[in-house]
Amino acid sequence: MTERPAGEALLDALEQGRVRVAERDAAGEWIVHAWVKEALLEIFRSSPTASHPTGTADAGFVDKRAFPPRRFRPEDGVRLVPGGSAVRRGAYLAPGVVCMPPMYVNVGAWVGAGTMIDSHALVGSCAQVGERVHLSAGAQLGGVLEPARARPVIVEDDALVGGNCGLFDGVLVGRGAVIAAGVQLTASTPVFDLVREEQLGRDPGRPPAIPPDAVVIPGTRPARGAYAAAHGLQQACALIVKYRDARTDAATALEDALRGPAGPAPGAPHA
């Protein structure tokens, strides 16, 4: 990426998908463009607070002047269903994205074509969401704006994030993975792969990366120490119980009829 706009030009470039906070390099590894985050932080620092009229009967929003809610047109190809949702300035939503109310997408986020953002879901600042992803009701993708070099939360193409899941601290969900309802993943969450018999996320400086096609469910493990053992105490973890196959795909089929045909925006990179 050679383009390094700032201010309003940066927000325009983010909304058009020409600039991203994170993207794959030639080797397929995710890289973070720290300069984008640094430029966004500078906009926050320099922008005064102002009223943002909504054009509806409510009182409007009060926020940084540089970040009014986005407004979409039919030609954008985004379905933003009425009911209290908002997409902040500087977020990219590809054609075919469906937003069910109420939901929220924050600045710097990138959402790929054909993705469903269900009710009460959050796509936090700088989160990167691929194509044909389903963020189920109540799913929370935490924002990672600071520190600037930290990896944002990333959900790759064709993944399913179940209801009331929480993905935080730069967690990466691989292509086609299924995160079952209620799973909470942070930088310190132990993830045990019962298929490959290994533990993920053991590096304290690197958030866990869920492998492609993994099926992850909530789990517990015995808490350490004699007191915990005496009282039968458990602590949360996550378990990879299988990898997707044809049967799993049938059980997790997304709402194609609701989405309609969708493809990537011209010139927009794949997640």
Image (cartoon, rainbow, N blue to C red):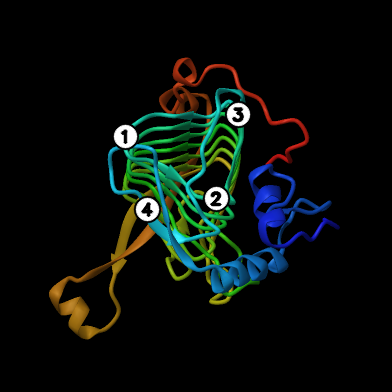
Q: Label 2: few (<14), some or many (≥20) within 10 Å?
A: many
Q: Is residue 215 above or below residue 198?
A: above
Q: Which residue is mark 4?
A: 61
User: CA separation, marks 4 and 1?
Assistant: 15 Å
Where in the figure is residue 103, as x and y percent of width and height?
38, 42
| Residue lying at 57% horizontally and 48% vertically, measured from the top left | 91
Q: Which residue is mark 1?
A: 83
Cα separation, mark 3 vs mark 4, equals 23 Å
Say if mark 3 contacts mark 4, CB within 8 Å.
no
> Which is nearer the N-term, disc 1 or disc 2?
1
Distance from Cα at disc 1 to Cα at disc 2: 19 Å
Q: Residue at x 43, y 28 (%)?
A: 252
Name the mark on residue 99: none
**Residue under pointer 3:** 76
Q: Which residue in the protein does label 2 denote?
A: 89
Please identify, in this view, whether the residue under mark 4 or under mark 1 is nearer the observer. Answer: 4
Disc 3 is placed on an element classified as helix
Q: Position of residue 229 (x, y in %)?
A: 20, 77
Q: Amino acid at mark 2?
A: Arg
Which residue type carries mark 1? Answer: Gly
Amino acid beneath label 3 = Asp
Q: Nearer the viewer, residue 190 or 127?
A: 127
Q: Disc 4 or 1, which lies upstream in sequence?
A: 4
